[in-house]
Amino acid sequence: MKSPIKGLIKNILIIILIFFVLGSVFGLFNISKESIEEISITQLADEVNQGKIKEIKVLKNDISIIYKDDTEALSKKETGETLSQALIGYGVEQNKLKEILFIFEEEDDSLMEILTFLAVFIIPIILIIIFFSIIFKNAKAGAAQTFDFTKTKAKIFGAEGHPKEKITFKDVAGLKEEKQELEEIVDFLKNPQKYLKMGARIPKGVLLVGPAGCGKTLLARAVAGESNVPFFSVAGSSFVEMFVGVGSGRVRSLFATAKKHQPCLVFIDEIDSIGKTRGPAMTGGNEEREQTLNQLLTEMDGFEQNNKIIILAATNRPDVLDAALLRPGRFDRKVVINLPDIKEREDILGIHSRGKPLGEDINIREVAERTPGFSGADLSNVFNEAALLAAKNDSKNISQEELLESIEKVLLGTERKSHIMTDKEKEIIAYHEAGHALVSAKCSNAEPVRKISIIGRGMAAGYTLKVPKEEKMLRNRKEFEAEMQILLSGHIAEKIVFGETTTGSSDDLNKASNIARNIVKKYGMSDMGPIIFGKRESDVFLESEVESRNYSESTAIKIDEEVSKIILEAKKKAEEILIKNREVLDKIAKRLIEKETIEREEFEEIIS
């Protein structure tokens, strides 16, 4: 919808432009006269006596003079007397007048009178009418917007909606079990009588839960494409307003519209914006959000039943949703969408490679292996970055090298090749990354090293990429200890080689400290026993997870001691590895200083 303010500004500018054009037109009438010299009647008489005048044109009281050298001048005479009488009165000789050609013109006043009438009366009236019509039109549009304020902002697609690219389950890679869950919904929408005859009640609401970018919205669009029924899409934030009653009014309007298109699907994206746990009202905005939620609860399962309206909702924060929203009869089914595994990543990359010119060296499997923890959106971004890089390099095809480069760009950021490091800094970073890589290679529970580089990317001055041999759902303490040893090894390598450490280890130390604290407090893997310390819950007002202490001060001291003990043990083991393999550490660091980047094959050759 166009903004009324922008439209008003545009119309005012048009009116100003009209006035400017009219002023320019009327100014043309005076340009010629202003450029010709005007003389007095006395000077004209003197020049007639001197014989300088060739021709005189008379139009009422205006006199146009043409000299014998073809120059021109203007003059005026008094009203009520002829030009000859005036000149004789000023001492002009009769014989001098006979030498001059006199031309008497009659003025055609019709055109001038019409222009004057238009300029003075008609055009101002027309401009005033246009101006006020614009004002009334904008006022009317504003009033219409006021009355439409509580109407739903949902967009309808599908059978009776706008033409849209149709997406089916074939366009969604992986998520086999999740798609099976939703196929029941699709079958019900296609053949509702089959279920109703058996007395079955299809779930009224399906909540799609998963991290950002894992395909929740894509799945909802696939359900709409498969079922071929009207599909209403609306964002949860579109219900949120500071004005009391607007959000609940929009919910009523949404369901009233959906009832006219039964059976249908209603998709609410980011439902946590209106579905958070209700608490004490502290501001008008919070009270309005609760009223919106109450209206949604009533519409989903209240006094009036909606048997053929299925609600799909997506969120990545199910922990903050109100319990009344998640009970059976409202959101009966929860579909958890996890990050894709290696096979699913390979399938997703295959879908995103469609329509792109790929080189002969492309190995989708290798790309899938190098992207653990990537969501579908991340993988799409990887292929997009590779396509941009190929276009930048004027390549005809996307190569494997460009794909691998795009993975690192998505993970860490753009290479900072222009950043000039001193020789000392380069050496410190080389030993830091060599420490990470060496300890990773010597730890039995660590992930294998894929690449080492001392070229800065994003916030990192250097990086060591590790890729797991296989993806795991569970982790044990030995794997956590190996990860801590790798994180601490850069810090320890700096200490061993240079006798001091730098600020480059701060992020590694923070991660290692968090792992050690989680081992003790969250996972129950420490010597303090299988106890979880601290109660974690989502704060309604801070909108984040907070931890409340449920243990004594003496226990807190023991926790700190246990965390320190775990970190010092990891530090000791990493230090032993680095001291024992000091020559290999030096080799890796020197190779990094020379080449700046070492791939897996070269690294394995050095440590072998």
Image (cartoon, helix red, strand yellow):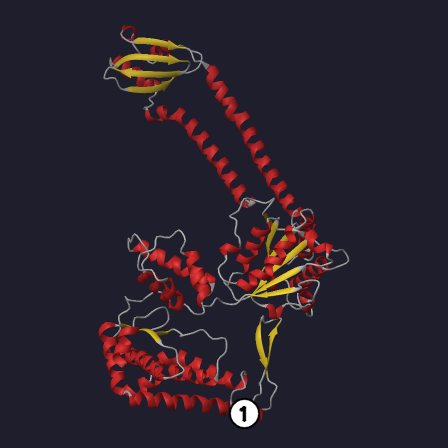
Q: Which residue: 36% across, 16% down?
A: 63
Q: Is residue 77 above or below residue 255?
A: above
Residue found at the far right of this picture: 303
Viewer-proximal residue among 224 and 79: 224
Q: Is residue 77 above or below residue 210?
A: above
Residue 259 in the image, given as x and y percentages of width and height: 70, 49
Please state, as top left, top right, bottom left or bottom right, where the C terminus lies in the image: bottom left
Tell me residue 313's x, y (percent). Answer: 61, 60
| Residue 499 in the figure: left or right of residue 471 | left
How many numbered discs?
1
Q: Quadrant of the N terminus?
A: top right
Residue 80, image quadrant: top left
Front-most of residues 500 and 564: 564
Asked if one can make out residue 499 in the rendered structure from this viewpoint, the answer is: no
- Quarter location, residue 27: top left
Displayed quadrant of residue 267: bottom right
Residue matched to label 1: 528
Query: Which amino acid lies under the numbered mark 1 shown in the image of this protein?
Result: Met
Q: Position of residue 156 (x, y in %)?
A: 60, 48
Measured as percent of width and height from the top left, residue 594 is found at 22, 74
Secondary element type, mark 1: loop
